[in-house]
Image (cartoon, grey):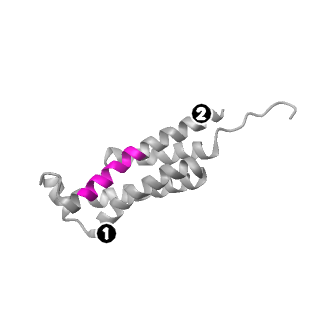
């Protein structure tokens, strides 16, 4: 049964990695204006700096979550929970809507919890 927990860890690490690309790309855009100035990008650039900091922090939390899921699964689970909360709140503040990744952020802590705590042990009769 430990194989299923290892698979769950691998899936959680990949999902967090994919979710972390967006905050890092936005951080690069805020520094170097790499995206075209479309209305949604202009509105995003005009938001409060605390929303930008919170969004880019999601990227760093994602990297820490990936590492901790491998080395310290309980800490990785807690970081995935913190990332999910910050991802949804800062995403709402920055984009003014829930994105697909905001919904995905709500699923990742469940997968990370399964990876951290493992599947329930089967009870044997008489033991």
**In this rendering, is residue 49 above or below 24?**
below
Q: Give the image location of residue 16, x and y in percent.
A: 43, 47
- The reply, left or right, for residue 93 in relation to residue 79 is left
Look at 43% across and 53% down and name the residue there. Answer: 62
Q: Secondary structure at mark 2?
A: helix
- Residue 79 seen: yes
Between the C-alphas of marks 1 and 2, the distance is: 39 Å
Residue 50 disc label: 1
Q: Of the residues under marks 1 and 2, which one precedes in the sequence? A: 2
Residue 114, image x, y percentages: 58, 42
Q: Main secondary structure of the magenta part?
A: helix
Out of 123 and 66, give the one closest to the viewer.
Answer: 66
In reply to whether residue 123 is colored magenta, the answer given is no
Indicate the position of residue 49 as horizontal and vertical percent values.
Answer: 27, 69
112 up-or-down from 50: above or below: above
In this orientation, which residue lies closer to the viewer: 77 or 6?
Answer: 6
- Start and end of the magenta stretch? 17-28
Assess whether residue 24 is covered by the magenta stretch: yes
Which mark, by number, is residue 4?
A: 2
Quadrant where the image shows the N terminus: top right
Which residue is at 56% across, 47% downward?
70
**Image location of residue 81, percent across then percent down:** 50, 54
**Residue 96 appears in view:** no
């Amino acid at each position: 049964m430990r194989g299923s927990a290892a698979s769950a860890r691998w899936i959680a690490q990949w999902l967090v990695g994919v979710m972390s690309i967006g905050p890092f790309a936005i951080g690069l855009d805020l520094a170097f204006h790499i995206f075209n100035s479309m209305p949604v990008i202009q509105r995003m650039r005009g938001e409060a700096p605390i929303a930008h900091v919170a969004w880019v922090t999601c990227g760093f939390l994602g990297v820490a979550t990936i590492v901790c899921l491998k080395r310290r699964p309980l800490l990785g689970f807690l970081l995935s929970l913190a990332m999910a909360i910050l991802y949804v709140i800062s995403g709402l503040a920055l984009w003014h809507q829930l994105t697909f990744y905001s919904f995905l952020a709500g699923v990742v802590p469940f997968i990370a919890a399964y990876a951290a705590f493992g599947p329930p042990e089967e009870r044997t009769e008489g033991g």
